[in-house]
Image (cartoon, rainbow, N blue to C red):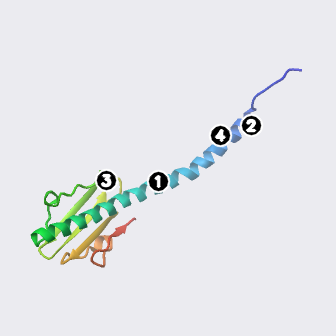
Amino acid sequence: MQDKKGFTLIELLIVVVIIGILAAIAIPKFSQTREKAYFAAMKSDLKNLASQQEIYYSDEYTYTNSTTNLGFVQSEAVNVAIAATSTGWSATATHDALAASQGCAIYYGGGAGISAFGVTQAGEISCVTQ
């Protein structure tokens, strides 16, 4: 008798199918995690912007549209747009990897509420995920 060692074709196919099933479960979870990271980056940028605006206001007694005046640097692939008046400001943040309808927004003082991203209360960061 010969001593045959190894796996049969059926055993190898079963292992490949199991790995395929696990990959089908894991890939959508990874995609959702990446999207959460994009929103975390946008929220973080808006919080940093809010701090910079208040520091600027305490020095100049007005708000600004200029990120240069604020010393604000946005995260990679995050686009922040600021609208400011002397009595308030508003800002929106979008991410290059997300749809244009997805993003976050915030406003303070006389800055108009940003209905596109669902902001209803001053100082509250609101995001639209779909």
Say what amino acid the circle numbered 1 marks: Ser
Whether residue 101 can be seen here: no
Say what amino acid the circle numbered 2 marks: Ile
Rendering coords of residue 60 (x, y %): 10, 69
Mark 4 lies on a secondary structure that is helix
> Is residue 84 toward the left or the right of residue 115 in the image?
left
Q: Nearer the viewer, residue 24 or 67?
A: 67
Task: Choose the circle earlier in sequence order: 2 or 4.
Answer: 2
Spatial separation of the CA atoms under disc 2 and disc 1? 32 Å
Say what amino acid the circle numbered 4 marks: Val
10 Å crowding of disc 3: few (<14), some (14-19), many (20+): few
Mark 2 lies on a secondary structure that is helix
Question: Looking at the picture, does residue 125 appear above or below residue 71?
Answer: below
Residue, disc 4: 16
Residue, disc 2: 10
For marks 2 and 1, give the one nearer the viewer: 1
Residue at (23% x, 75% y) in the render: 108
Task: Choose the circle earlier in sequence order: 1 or 4.
Answer: 4
